[in-house]
Image (cartoon, grey):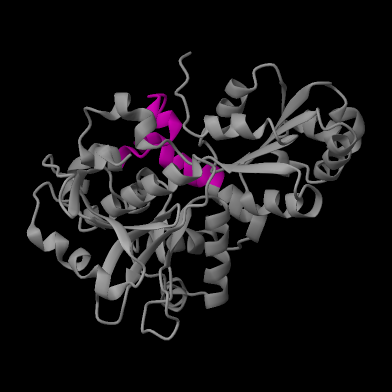
Amino acid sequence: MKVIEREISTAILKAIEYYSVICVTGPRQSGKSTLIKHLFKSFTVFSLEDIDVRNFAENDPIGFLNQTEEGMILDEVQRVPSLFSYIQGFVDNNPKRKFILSGSSNFQVMKSITQSLAGRVALFELLPMSYNEVTDIYKDMSLDEILFNGLYPAICAKKNIPEMLYPFYVKTYLEKDVRELLQVKDIMQFNTFLKLCAGRIGSVFNASQLANEVGVSSNTITSWLSILQASYIVYLLQPYYENFGKRLIKSPKLYFCDTGLACYLLNIESTKQLSRDKLRGALFENFVVSEFIKHRINQGKEPLLYFYRDSNQNEIDLLSLNEGELSAFEIKSSMTYNPVFEKTLKKSASLIKKPISNKTIIYAGDMENNISEIKLVNYKHLF
């Protein structure tokens, strides 16, 4: 079977030279198991989703970890958090022993790592495929098809279709994980919350407003949102501000980690429906922001992505800080260039003190320009 090469592989293989423990987290079905098995073919794989394997690990952790001499892959390691302390002892006594860990709950994994493996582990996050990784597969797709399909590996590898994957993804994974982490009593309320979040893609997050619509407290909304973040379902884009006294928006903007899942939650059932949906522009913005996030974390780096908005309605969709240099991006789903797209980018110097080295409009059209002060780039050529 042909494996789609993941961009994050280079960073992981570099890290294994310096760390005894590698941990890859990310949403369920993002390809974590496939990736680490592909990169570390000589290591024995143990899935802690398997009840018998989990019982062995819980009842005899030292015997379990002693099964191999070179290294081992522990899939869904958050299932047995007590293992982290024993792994610490193993790598302290023999740094040449390698442990490759994967987990779908960043909340549970990070809690265990902080307690037991701090300083001994290289951490990576694997999101669904980036467009760069599937260019050959998606090159003939329209923008609406890309947004509707999303970039989960099963869709990209044509092993599933959106109409089948996403409904079961929500029922079998999201509801299961949420029940375990939050003990949500009314799953229907939580599903309403999910759908309302999808309807706010690209909007500034307002917990009080959502609380009123769902019928729960603001604290509950904040708690639910933290679990969506820890489960890699949503991403909060933080505002950029240099002067704390300036009248700037202080709340983050909400995005989903995959547009296919967002389309399902918005009850969008076809590309034809998507093409005329009022949130199509927001979904395109979501897609572009997600691509920037993946590009950074696939290099093993923090995203360092922001947006700008002030009380005068001046807004820059995306700001990226890379090697100390700030870049500004305007994101438009239109296939036709319009000079009005440049409006905020042209006055960005008066809004932001830090020099902006690169100003770019990202859109869906074919005309591109890389020599002007404000560049024009098709979304397929971002990186």
Position of 28 with respect to 353 (left or right) is right
Residue that appears at 45% across and 71% down: 214
- Nearest the camera: 244 or 22? 244
- Asked if residue 166 is among those painted magenta in the image, a careful observer would answer yes
> Magenta part of the protein: which range?
148-173
| Number of marks in picture | 0
Q: Nearer the viewer, residue 380 or 225?
A: 380
Identify which residue is drawn at 44% across, 43% down: 294
On screen, 343 above or below 278? Answer: below
Q: Is residue 175 magenta?
A: no
Answer above or below: position of 194 versus 252. above
Residue 151 appears in the rendering: yes
Front in this rendered view, residue 5 or 205: 5
Residue lying at 32% horizontally and 37% vertically, measured from the top left: 149
| Spot occupied by residue 275 in the image (x, y as percentages of width and height) | 17, 47
Q: Looking at the rendering, which quadrant does residue 36 occupy?
A: top right
Q: Is residue 315 left or right of residue 119?
A: left
User: The C terminus lies in which quarter of the figure?
Assistant: top left
**280 to 173, vertically: above or below:** below
Quick check: 47 above or below 117? Answer: above
Residue 273 seen in the figure:
no
Residue at position x 91%, y 33% in the image: 62
Looking at the picture, tell me which residue is in the foreground, 103 or 290. Answer: 290
Q: Position of residue 98 (x, y in %)?
A: 76, 29
Q: What kind of secondary structure does the magenta stretch mostly adopt?
A: helix
Tell me where residue 325 sits by quadrant.
bottom left
Q: Position of residue 341 (x, y in %)?
A: 15, 60
